[in-house]
Amino acid sequence: MTRVLALAALVLAVSACGESKPPLTPEHVELAKLCVDGGGDQAHCECQATKVDELLAAGEINPKIQEALILQAQGKEDEADAIMLALPYNERFEHPSLVAVRQLECETPN
């Protein structure tokens, strides 16, 4: 019985140490892929997509910002502009600025 309890404690300790990351959203994957397809470094593009995810998770930006970023990266400027213009006035300027500032934290490859 002691061995079972010790094994259970060990399994619990190991599983607690390795925090699992949530699965990547389709939007994250698409944004990173479009960045790489546009010539960006994989790690840098993943970092930038992660920064958008973090802002969304914290409720700091409107989810429509991510949608507009994806459309813009796809070359669908008019659709991206339409989304941005439909946002409340303060979000049109504040939210893209938050994204830009956070993405600047990503290390630029040499």
Image (cartoon, rainbow, N blue to C red):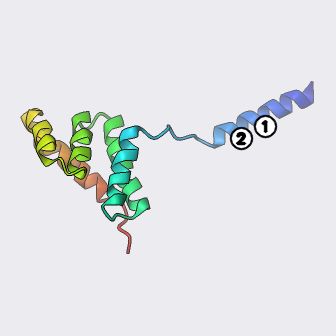
Q: Quadrant of the C terminus?
A: bottom left
Question: Label 1 crowding class (10 Å Cα cut-off): few <14, some 14-19, many 20+?
Answer: few
Residue 40, above or below 13: below
**Element marked by disc 2:** helix
- The answer to whether the residues at label 2 and label 1 have Cβ atoms under 8 Å apart is yes
Q: Position of residue 9 (x, y in %)?
A: 78, 32
In the depicted view, which residue is nearer to us: 17 or 45? 45
Residue 69 relative to residue 30: left or right: left
Three-letter residue code for mark 2:
Val
User: Which labelled disc corresponds to residue 14?
Assistant: 2
Query: Is residue 38 shown left or right of residue 15?
Result: left
What's the residue at 36%, 35% (across, down)? Answer: 57
Q: Which residue is mark 1?
A: 10
Q: Residue furthest top?
A: 1
Q: Residue at x 8, y 37 (%)?
A: 85
Q: Secondary structure at mark 1?
A: helix
- Residue 102 at x, y percent in the picture: 29, 52
Quadrant of the drawing holding the N terminus:
top right
Mark 1: which amino acid? Leu
Kindly identify the residue that appears in the image at 35 percent across and 67 percent down: 108
Q: Residue at x 29, y 59 (%)?
A: 104
